[in-house]
Amino acid sequence: MKKTFKEALVKRLFIAVFILTCMVPVLEAQQATRARLTVLNIDSQNMNMTPEQMGNLVRIEIDKLDTFEVTDRYDVRFLLDKHNLDISNCYGKICLVEYGRVIGSDLMLGGSVERFGEVIVLTLRLIDVKKEAVIQTSIREYQNLPLELQTMVRVSIREMFGLHNDPDLVVKLTNPFGYESMITNPDVSSVNLAGPRMGWVFYTGENARIFRRPKDQGGYDIYPSMFQIGWQFEKQYLNAGSYQALVEFIPMISGLDQSLLIPSVTLLNGLRNNRIGIELAVGPTINFVRVAKGYFDSENQWQLENSWDSSMGSIPYSITERLDSRGPISLRSGFVLAAGWTYKSGRLNIPINAFFIPSKTGARFGISIGYNERKK
C-alpha cells in the first residue's frame, strides 16, 4: 500500500531533525578545538589610521580565515575594562603575553605598520601565550598605496599562515618598478597620453612625383613632405600586468606649411608597456584629398577624363583614379603601423611616435611628438 503524502513528509522531517541533532555535537567539538586568538592595537606610524583602527582591520581579516576563535572587538573592550588594562603602548611580546594570560587567550597577534618615504612596512607577529614565544612572523614592504592598506593586511596574514596569494597582486603591491595597474594607478592617475601632436609626414613613389608637378598638370608644386598638427584622444580599456590596451583617435591637419589644408582622422588600437613606455599600434586612417579620373595617353602622360574630345569616339585607354589637384575632394583610406616611446620627466610625458602607411601608389612615413602632464 502506497504511503500518503503526509506520512512521507513527516518521515523526511524526522530524518532532517535527526541529522541536525547529530551534527550539533560535531560542530561544537570543532569550535571547541579552535584556538582563541586576540588582536589588540596594531602600532601605526605615519599612516592615516589609528592603532585601534589598524587592530580592527587586522582582526576582520583574520576572522575571514575562519580558522581561529577570534575575540570580538567588543569583547576585547569589555575584558580590557574589566581588568583595567591599558593597551596604548602594548605592542611587544612581553606585554602581549601578560595581557593574553589575564584575558584568557591562547594566541595574541601584534605588529606594526609604518610608512618610510615611498614604502609601507607591515609587520605581524603571532604569539603563543602559553609558550611565551613568537610562532609566526610576516614582514613585508609595500608600495606607498594607502588606499590598498586592507589588501596589504590580507596578503600579509595569508602569507603568515601559509595560504596562497595571487602572485600578480603581490607584485602590484610590492614592486615599484614592476608595472602600473588599476591598483598602483587608479583611473584618476592612470597613464594617459592624450594631448597635442605635431610632426612631419613624407611621401614616396607616385604620390611624391604628383606633389612636385606643376598645378596645371594636376600636381601641387610643393615638396613631398609637410608639417602635421592635431590632437590625440585615447581611452584605456584594459590594464593588466605591465601592459595597457587602449584605443586612440587622432584628427590631424597636414600641409599648413605649404598653403595646403589636408585633414585626416586615424583610429588606432594600441598596446603600451607602462614600465618602459614602449607602444605599438595599428589601425585605419582616412584622408580628405583631391582625386580625379583620367587616363595615360600614348605618350604615357596623365590626362583628365573630361579632356578627351568626344568627337573622336570613346576613350581607348583605361580609366583610373589618382591624386590630382584639379579633382573633387574624396575620401581615401589607408592602414597605419605605428610605434612609439614615452620619455618621462617628473610629471611631464613626452610621447615620440613613428608611423608607416603602405600604398601601391607610394608609401607615407613620418614622426610626431606630443606632450602632456600626468595629473593625480
Image: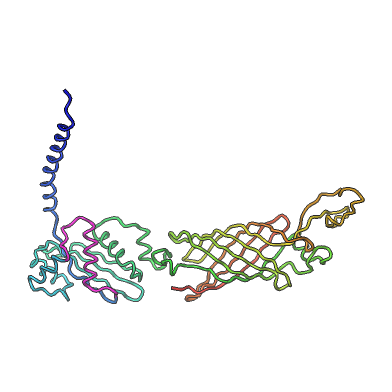
Front-lying residue, 90 or 3: 3
- Picture coordinates of residue 35 (x, y %)? 14, 57
Render colour scheme: rainbow
* Relative vertical location of residue 246 with respect to residue 111 in this rendering, above or below: above
* Relative vertical location of residue 23 with respect to residue 232 in this rendering, above or below: above
Quadrant of res 11: top left
Residue 69 falls within the magenta-colored stretch: yes
Quadrant of res 229: bottom right
Task: Please tell me how many numbered marks the rendered image carries.
Answer: 0
* 141 relative to 258 in the view: left or right: left
- Picture coordinates of residue 325 (x, y %)? 78, 64
Front-lying residue, 318 or 170: 318
- Picture coordinates of residue 129 (x, y %)? 12, 64
Front-lying residue, 84 or 177: 84
Task: Give the residues in magenta.
Answer: 47-73
- Tell me the residue at 17%/76% (across/down): 88
- Picture coordinates of residue 42 (x, y %)? 21, 70
* 276 relative to 209 in the view: left or right: left
Quadrant of res 170: bottom left
* 36 relative to 228 in the view: left or right: left
Return the residue found at the far right: 311
* 315 relative to 139 in the view: left or right: right
* Quadrant for the N terminus in the image: top left
* Quadrant for the C terminus in the image: bottom left
- Tell me the residue at 21%/68% (across/down): 55
Return the residue found at the far top: 1
- Tell me the residue at 18%/31% (across/down): 5
